[in-house]
Image: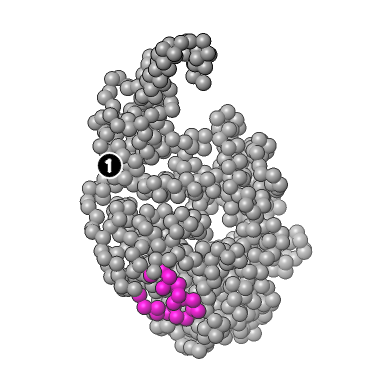
């Protein structure tokens, strides 16, 4: 009901003549139309058609997660199209009938409309940065879905999805689209029961969905490449996401050999900002229809997507550290649904999330028969930590006699891989009897050994001349974790005639020769051995991986072990793996049987019984104690939501680089977990997002960090 001169239109209609009513209605319509027109700023001439641009402003504040209307000047009409980057005045005020002030910020035009619902003066677009349409409707819809799932803002997700602009790259044209390649041969996919059928479905343009447990060996890059080539042969696009640049380079090489150059691009940070943007533009323009890349490539705007593939979804690299911290697996599942594309989740191991996809029927298992597994896998031997070294050389290397024998025999046939859980030289200390970490009595900081053998706190420097374990009273210490450098030195003394190579964060080797050598590596940095793989592998300090205070400790330990053991030759070629860990533990037994799927299925059943993710959905709320309590009090959580905590967050170790989830320096934070039933995840995310927005609008308290599906559950 509109109003004119303080009277309702309905009231006038009840008492006026027909001619008067017609005049009044016409006046009301003219007034409405006049208010709907964007009023110009300083007399600027506006576009004649669709003069209003709805802009996504690059402000990742949760209470500003909406579009803002701006007037389109006539001079910018041709370039100001949906999807382009613009600059606008944001935060301007209205004064004297015009918009003034405001800070210049970047944004994207999402659509052009004829009218605006805003009744004030519309400020015009300040600048069209580029006529390149980088934010397509499909990409915008994906970003919106990801933002809603993770209780984040659309601007933050778009910042992850669209790389920064490089003008020189935009100025160069992209090459023409090549004709589809021929369908690939089945190759090593024949080892999997449904492998040939999966490739055939992709070539036909179907959308099969599979969870693939890869056989041990170095053939998985070729198998991923064949899956991508099958989708391309069917006239559709392909997207393959892997954890790191080394894996991306291997898949890139395999796909180039299979279909030649020019049909795909590699999107990794190693290419540099300008070259990476040039390749991204080739995808956005439709010149290339296949992408291989790391985490950020999950948003690559591949046209007519036919396959999304993710390798090793348990790797923490797939979880983006930037807000709202989406996981590549969930983003690719969303893309598979939105774009009706095939889905392939592969790995040497199997996560509980992958097992859940199979259990619910959303995806089908893609595995090999047990005979194939036994033929491809090495022999795995377990060695208890209580086994003593009876050989003098084994004592020098701090190895049980059986482990030392595995290394010695392996060196007669080729290189031997030694996996060490952590990098570094200085070890952390723990009680030799009960493995309780050695802590300072003054500040609870970790104790470390000084040059003269004395103990001192690594945080406050206080000496501990007479340390005893607070749990069992023991007085003997052991190195909690011995780093790769020290392990390499001790093995070098035990095998003085054998070269020792190290691979870790500071220096990662891609390959090593097939000649006898010791290769000491941290998990994930293991190089590929030429000539068929390693002769043997030794997995040290298994208790350190299994003893982590994390819900995923067993799953992660098995994933790391399988990644190293898969580089060892099969049993037929004499390959042997020795793992130093308690033989009766479930992850150790799964390694011995090479049964990652069985381990994941049992883990999923236990989590379902206890109500743990991924069966339930969880959110982490972290901040100062009073802020966390207030946000949870005001949030309209779904019915049946369970709040766990809050509990204090541990302060980060001194000297360690700050991570995205760490509290600000000097602040004591708490964390609460909110758990809801299956199917309530969207409502939980919406409730927490709305509560955060309300606090920001009212400027109440300090910011609170919300993370959906936190990976670090203890």
Residue at the (38%, 55%) spot, across then down: 300
Front in this rendered view, residue 547 or 711: 711
Q: Quadrant of residue 479?
A: bottom right
The correct choice, above or below, for 615 with respect to 381 in the image is above
Residue at the (48%, 83%) spot, across then down: 569
Q: Based on the picture, tell me whether residue 574 belongs to the magenta stretch.
A: no
The correct choice, above or below, for 669 with respect to 714 in the image is above
The correct choice, above or below, for 659 with respect to 580 in the image is above
Residue at the (46%, 42%) spot, across then down: 154
Percent across and percent down for residue 565 are: 52, 77
Residue at the (60%, 82%) spot, across then down: 381
Front in this rendered view, residue 316 or 69: 69
Percent across and percent down for residue 529 are: 42, 78
- Span colored in magenta: 184-203
| Left or right position of 128 against 458 | left
Q: Is residue 421 visible?
A: no
Q: What is the chief secondary structure element of the magenta stretch? A: helix
Residue found at the far right of this picture: 472
| Left or right position of 656 against 241 | right
Q: Is residue 85 visible?
A: yes
Circle 1 packing at 10 Å, graded few (<14), some (14-19), many (20+), is some
Quadrant in which the C terminus is drawn: bottom right
The correct choice, above or below, for 426 with respect to 631 in the image is below
Residue corresponding to mark 1: 131
Percent across and percent down for residue 1 are: 51, 21
What's the colour scheme? one colour
Percent across and percent down for residue 466 are: 72, 60
């Amino acid at each position: 009901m509109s109003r004119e001169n303080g009277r309702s239109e309905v009231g006038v209609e009840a008492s006026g003549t027909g001619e008067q009513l017609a005049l009044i209605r016409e006046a009301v319509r003219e007034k409405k139309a006049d208010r709907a027109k964007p009023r110009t700023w300083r007399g600027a001439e506006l576009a004649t058609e669709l003069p209003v641009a709805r802009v996504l402003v690059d402000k990742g504040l949760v209470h500003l997660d909406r579009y803002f209307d701006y007037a389109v000047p006539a001079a910018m009409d041709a370039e100001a199209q949906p999807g382009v980057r613009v600059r606008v005045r944001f935060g301007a005020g209205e004064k004297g009938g015009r918009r003034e002030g405001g800070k210049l910020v970047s944004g994207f035009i999402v659509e052009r409309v004829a009218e605006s619902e805003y009744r004030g003066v519309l400020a015009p677009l300040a600048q069209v940065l580029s006529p390149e349409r980088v934010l397509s409707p499909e990409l915008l819809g994906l970003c919106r879905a990801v933002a809603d799932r993770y209780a984040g803002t659309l601007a933050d997700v778009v910042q992850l999805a669209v790389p920064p602009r490089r003008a020189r790259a935009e100025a160069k044209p992209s090459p023409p689209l090549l004709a589809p390649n021929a369908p690939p041969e089945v190759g090593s996919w024949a080892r999997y029961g449904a492998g040939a059928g999966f490739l055939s479905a992709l070539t036909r343009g179907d959308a099969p969905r599979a969870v693939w447990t890869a056989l041990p060996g170095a053939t998985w890059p070729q198998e991923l490449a064949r899956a991508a080539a099958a989708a391309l042969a069917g006239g559709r696009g392909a997207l393959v996401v892997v954890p790191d640049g080394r894996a991306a380079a291997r898949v890139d090489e395999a796909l180039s050999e299979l279909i030649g150059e020019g049909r795909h691009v590699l999107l990794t940070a190693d290419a540099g900002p300008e070259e990476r943007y040039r390749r991204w533009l080739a995808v956005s323009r439709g010149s290339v229809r296949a992408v291989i890349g790391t985490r950020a490539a999950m948003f690559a705007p591949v046209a007519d997507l036919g396959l999304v593939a993710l390798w090793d979804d348990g790797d923490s690299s797939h979880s983006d550290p930037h807000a709202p911290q989406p996981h590549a697996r969930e983003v690719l599942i969303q893309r598979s649904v939105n774009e009706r594309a095939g889905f392939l989740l592969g790995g040497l191991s199997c996560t509980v999330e992958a097992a859940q996809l199979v259990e619910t029927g959303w995806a089908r298992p893609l595995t090999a028969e047990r005979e194939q597994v036994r033929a491809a896998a090495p022999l795995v031997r377990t060695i208890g930590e209580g086994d003593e070294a009876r050989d003098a050389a084994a004592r020098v290397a701090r190895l049980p006699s059986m482990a030392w024998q595995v290394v010695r025999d392996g060196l007669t046939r080729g290189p031997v891989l030694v996996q060490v859980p952590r990098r570094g030289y200085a070890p952390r200390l723990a009680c030799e009897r009960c493995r309780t970490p050695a802590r300072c009595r003054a500040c609870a900081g970790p104790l470390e050994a000084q040059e003269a053998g004395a103990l001192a706190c690594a945080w406050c420097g206080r000496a501990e001349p007479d340390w005893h374990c607070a749990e069992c009273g023991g007085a003997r210490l052991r190195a909690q974790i011995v780093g790769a450098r020290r392990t390499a030195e001790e093995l070098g003394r035990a095998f003085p005639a054998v070269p020792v190579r190290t691979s870790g964060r500071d220096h990662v080797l891609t390959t090593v020769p097939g000649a006898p050598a010791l290769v000491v590596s941290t998990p994930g940095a293991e190089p590929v051995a030429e000539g068929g793989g390693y002769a043997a592998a030794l997995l040290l300090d298994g208790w350190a991986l299994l003893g982590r205070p994390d819900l995923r400790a067993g799953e992660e330990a098995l994933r790391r072990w399988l990644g190293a053991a898969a580089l060892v030759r099969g049993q037929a070629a004499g390959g042997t793996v020795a793992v130093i860990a308690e033989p009766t533990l479930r992850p150790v037994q799964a390694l011995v049987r090479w049964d990652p799927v069985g381990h994941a299925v049992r883990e999923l059943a236990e989590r379902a019984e206890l109500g743990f993710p991924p069966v339930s959905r969880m959110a982490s709320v972290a901040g100062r104690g009073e802020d966390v309590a207030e946000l949870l009090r005001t949030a309209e959580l779904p019915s049946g939501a369970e709040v766990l905590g809050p509990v204090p967050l541990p302060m980060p170790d001194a000297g360690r680089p700050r991570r995205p989830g760490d509290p600000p320096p000097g602040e004591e934070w708490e964390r609460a977990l909110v758990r809801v039933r299956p199917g309530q995840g969207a409502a939980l995310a919406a409730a927490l997002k709305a509560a955060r927005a309300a606090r920001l609008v009212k400027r109440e308290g300090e910011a609170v960090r919300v993370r959906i599906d936190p990976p670090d559950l203890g």
